[in-house]
Image (cartoon, grey):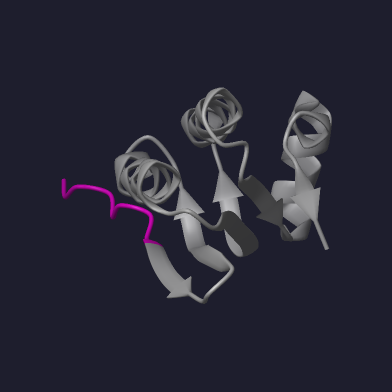
Amino acid sequence: MGELPQPMLRVDHERSADAHVIRLVGEMDLGNVDEARAALMSAIDGDDVDVIVDMSELEFIDSMGISMLLQAQAASRRDSNRLRFRGSGDAVAKILQLTGVDEQLRFVD
């Protein structure tokens, strides 16, 4: 019996003079959360601009992904408090609402 395919996550970066946008595309779970964590923490630690996590194309997130988002938010609050979140697909929005995480993350339009 073959191995199950790993969910695909793409992490895109877009920088401007006033923001560093990190776009999460696909599915984020235990198997690929470290890639997103590294991108977020690098941006929080390295940039002097707002860091915006765009989740509008994120189709799925598990408990490890949620935990990572909360850890990144906490790290930002201890440091510069420049981390913001934008958008989420219906499935991800529902998970964030059911867990109460949508009230803990700083969302912008």
**Residue at 27% from the left image edge and 49% from the top image edge:** 4
Counting from the top left corner in percent of width and height, residue 102 is at 79, 36
Image: 28 above or below 62: below
Q: In which quarter of the image is residue 59?
A: bottom right
Q: In front: 35, or 94?
A: 35
Magenta segment's dominant SS is loop
How many numbered circles does the render carry?
0
Q: In front: 30, or 82?
A: 82
**Residue at 33% from the left image edge and 45% from the top image edge:** 32
Residue 108 placement, left or right of 61? right
Image: 14 above or below 108: below
Which quarter of the rendering shows the C terminus? bottom right
Counting from the top left corner in percent of width and height, residue 56 is at 67, 65
Q: Give the range drawn in magenta.
A: 1-9
Q: In front: 68, or 47?
A: 47
Image: 83 above or below 10: above
Instruction: Please say whether residue 2 is one of the residues in the magenta stretch.
Output: yes
**Furthest-left residue in this view:** 1
Counting from the top left corner in percent of width and height, residue 101 is at 74, 30
Q: Quadrant of residue 30?
A: top left
**Residue at 56% from the left image edge and 36% from the top image edge:** 80
Residue 57 placement, left or right of 96? left
Q: In which quarter of the image is residue 103?
A: top right
**Residue at 79% from the left image edge and 56% from the top image edge:** 108
